[in-house]
Amino acid sequence: MASKLAGSVVITGIAEASSEREDSLETLVFRGARAALDEAGLDRGDLDGVVLAASDQTDGRAITSMLTSGPAGAYLNDEINVASSPGHALALGFMQILSGTHQRLLVSSWGKSSETAGSVQAAERLSADPFFERDGGLSAAAAAAFQAQQRRVNATDGALAAARIAARNHGDVDEAAILASAVVASPLRELEVPPEIDRTFSILLERAGRDTPAVTLSSVGWCSDSGRIAERDLSALPHLQRAAEDAYQRAGVQSPTDEIGSWHLHDYTPDAEILAYGPLGICAAAAANDLALSGATAYGGLLPVNPDGGSVRGEAPFGGPMAKVLAAVRQVRGTATNQVSDLDRALAQLTTGFAGQFQTVAIVERQQ
Amino acid sequence: MTDVVSPRAVAAVGVGQTPFGPTSEAPTYVVMLQQAASQALEAANLTIDEIDAVVLALAPESLMGVNHAERWCTDYIGGRMKPVLRIQTGGATGLSAVQAGYQHVASGLYERVLVVGADRVRESGDAQKIFNKIWDPFYERALPFTTITMIAMSAVRYMHNYGMTERQMARVSQKAHYNGALNPNAHIRREVTVDEVMESRYLSWPLKLLDACPQSAGGCAVVLSSADAVKPESQSPAWITGVSMAGETYYIGDRLETSERGYDYGDAEALAVAAERAYAMAGITDPRTQIDAVETYASFTPVEIHNAEALGLADLGTAAPLFEEGFFDLDGEIPLNPSGGVICTNPISVTAMVRFVEAVLQVQGRAGAHQVPGAKTVVATGAGGSHQFFNVAIVSSEQPK
């Protein structure tokens, strides 16, 4: 089934930038935006819009987009802040190009933990239901640990499978070292959870048609689950399945494992990655643990997942999930570290909220 | 060659707003969300199961004390197992959320979208203490800047440039309160005289208490639909024919020089930019003859004066006398804020959405005692940040071709 959307939206520039110790948040955001514009051969004046994914408490500000919209290129230009998820910002940018109101816009996200008042986990804890869950110490790390525990108790060698995924991503650390590393939030170990890094990500979206190298953003799908994690089965991600179904339908993907060459999945924990296999159609949900143990998801395997090593070496708070889109684009361009051969299409999963409450799936492909 | 694509037609087919009032008398945040959403769904003759996606309008979360409250609220707005996203552009949030909802439908991805929000502005204490935190911590926060002193500085600049008087500002307040008294949902519902405004206490010269907006609580919601998905039994569609947003610089010190357009900090240049784009999209070439009414986000009286100019309803520096002459009164040439506007109601997360909802009510002919007779094209605007983010929507009774 060919999609009516295919080919409409293209990505002509991507960039990520790290923060030096003395950099301000403005400098970090500017550096990423400027680099994406440079890669696309464009200037700020060529944009007709900017879509931000900005988290106030993570940035330690009441309205952080006030500070960051200008460095992202929005001075006297169209600007909107999608504060729930970088995946949602990508989705809105996608819709703005599809609708025809915009021809060319920049999507920008970031995370700079040094700006956060207190700590990122303390800010995350303020996201919890103030009456029932906040006093329980719920945080992103705690929710991820609950989810990992729920998955592992229902799987044979669940901890080993998680360690195998983490070892695959590290590349230079074996499973024994991972299983011997310190527990950070039981059952999660230090070498399974990424440290916080400061980074910004920018993606330049355009309406197809300009004579310039581009990758097609063929679809975005997104869906939400309950905010009450006590009411969720954290080892099932039905909303991810819904997001994936929407993305596949919009991209005209009928057989995901045959048509997608590289999978860039949320991996704040290895358990989150394994839990995504079923809803994304990589394998049956009941077979996910075995797939992780089999090694088939390694670079060079039949179903390469996070061939660039994923996020295990560091993830920027809040804005970090956008890294998955950049990794997918690099694969389709053929410029990735650990490039997968004969690849036309790649999938990125962007996840936000406690134990993945908000799920976004984006599919990029070689321009036809 | 890049293809030119026209957006799919999008209509508001149901709107809802709770009666606005002080936070001390308001229900809980989620109850206000549900009340507004239920009203809008009922007006559209739809159930939540018939909604494809949800957009939450939630401005500074510091005002309610829950970080990323969209996570917490998803269940209460029918968002579980639906696409949900949250918009935050400060005071402009409510209209930005409508614009995001518009994109859901205009893109062709979704048929029906619920846009909803609420606010309890004093939930976390004095909003001005929180708003002080929006400024640069080194140069501007310590002045001290609040949203009151920010606009006071702008007003002083406008007075210097164009000779605006405090009495002219008071006339704007008198008009707003007259209109607000006719609006059953307004927070402040009493008429005031120009002399009463002049005698009210100073907040920050030249702004007085009755030049300023209240801190309100309440909810607001809109159901947006494609033309094909409009149910016959729903409210008559109000079509969105233009949308745009534009942002100013962050640092107010950078806005003090006169721009190429002739604007400075006393004006609202980014609103003019957003209006030009929205007008172009809607085919409006002469706003003074093609617009029947305006609901503009003006939290203080001098803002309404410079907004009228930025929207092209008067030349730069000429609007204040027009307010005195009644040009913008409910029975004037172009009624400005027939609902009473922000001077009478300011639930921050949805203040700009209320502007849109009031524009919808006007083109539907359902605005009641503050109806502008025969209104067919009405403009709604929002403003957020340090008078930094401005957005514009054009609402019409006629479906765009």
Image (spheres, coloured by chain):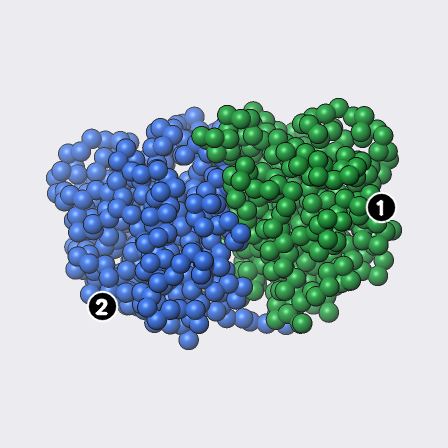
Chain colours: A green, B blue
Instruction: Answer few, some or many: residues within 10 Å of disc 2's Cα (few below 14, many 20 plus, some between 14 and 19).
Output: few
Indicate the quadrant containing the C terminus of chain A: top left, top right, bottom left or bottom right: bottom right
Q: Can residue B34 be seen at all in this image of the molecule? A: yes
Q: Amino acid at mark 2?
A: Gly
Residue beneath the point at 71% across and 44% down = A273
Tell me the number on the disc at residue B374: 2
Q: Secondary structure at mark 1?
A: loop
Indicate the quadrant containing the N terminus of chain A: top left, top right, bottom left or bottom right: bottom right
Please state if A183 lies on the left or on the right of B81 as rendered. Answer: right
Q: Toward which corner of the image does residue A254 lie, by quadrant?
A: bottom right
In front of the other: B327 or B384? B384
Q: Can residue B287 be seen at all in this image of the molecule? A: no
Instruction: Answer few, some or many: residues within 10 Å of disc 1's Cα (few below 14, many 20 plus, some between 14 and 19).
Output: some
Residue beneath the point at 44% across and 38% down = B60
Give the residue at mark 1.
Answer: A295
Q: Chain of mark 2?
A: B
Residue B1 pos. (x, y %): 63, 72
